[in-house]
Image (spheres, rainbow, N blue to C red):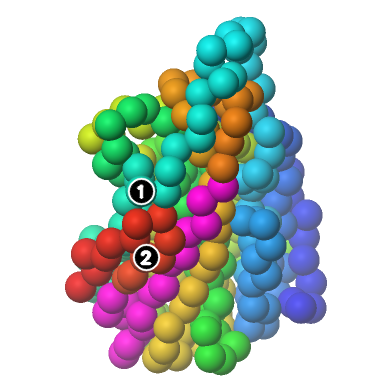
Amino acid sequence: MPSRRTLLRGLGTAGVGALAGCNAFARGDATTTPPKSSTKNGSSSSNGTTSPAANAPATSSSNTSSSTSATPPPSSKDARFEASLVRHATADHPARIAAKLTNVGDRSFTVMDGYGLPFTASSVSQVHGDGSIFLYPASKPASTYVGYGDSPNGTKGTTTQSSGCWRLRGAASTAAIALVQTLHPGDSARVAYDVFVFGDGPCPSNGRYHAAHSIGASGGAKNTQGPSTRWHLGLTISYEGGDVSKVTATGVGAGSNGH
């Protein structure tokens, strides 16, 4: 555990779907190596943030018809989950990765997740080792629900390349929100993240870093009250020489176009 943690006020945002509440933690001691993240039922937290309530129930202002409620949940064969390396790290910008869920079936379905639909992640732990990397949203709407700036202990909010890797200093806060999106045949939900190490700790060591997550899926359009299923997704980031070398996906007909 870090030696100090400072509770920040969460982002008071209203988003697509149900706002489950807001809360966040910031690392008070940027020199302490972040703990390994823990993942349970699709929610993970560590390294300066608490992940949003990805499994929070969504609400609807309209009544769900009996026919909509009876729509069976989609099959895992109806969706393809992919992960990709968008760009390598350079002197001008950090590495960027992306996760994408595509409806490859012949009927619409609705998915529900945290702020990073279809894959919400912040701190990603090393598979064999104690290292971790920090993912900061680089695409909307995910970036709308994450705040970044100076921390109460005086650490300035900066993103810099120093001592061999890109670093995020300061404080990050996340809105605990569940987003709902209908994917018609051929549609995709995609989120991108920039890759950092949090604070002044050591650069991530070579190896694989893995995050697990789950999202809710129901049949039909904007259907969050009928029969549903859970899809378990995984994201593995290979890190070598201070940069991301490959990203792979697992779960729900997973494919990978990582480099």
Q: Nearer the viewer, mark 2 or mark 1?
A: 1
Q: Is residue 240 magenta?
A: yes
Q: Residue 254: x and y, percent?
A: 34, 60
Assess disc 2: are there few (<14), some (14-19) or many (≥20) residues with their C-alpha within 10 Å of its C-alpha: many
Q: Quadrant of residue 188?
A: top left
- Judge left or right: residue 109 versus residue 246: right
Could you tell me if residue 174 is visible in this image?
Answer: yes
- Judge left or right: residue 75 versus residue 19: left
Along the viewing direction, whichever of 116 and 14 lies nearer the viewer: 116
Q: Residue at x 40, y 65 (%)?
A: 250
Residue receiving disc 2: 249
Check residue 138 in the rendering and tell me which mark sits there, or answer none: none
Check residue 77 in the rendering and tell me which mark sits there, or answer none: 1
Amino acid type, label 2 = Ala
Q: Secondary structure at mark 1?
A: helix
Looking at marks 2 and 1 on the same chain, the residue that comes earlier in the sequence is marked by: 1
Q: Quadrant of residue 152?
A: bottom right
Amino acid type, label 1 = Lys
The quadrant the C terminus occupies is bottom left
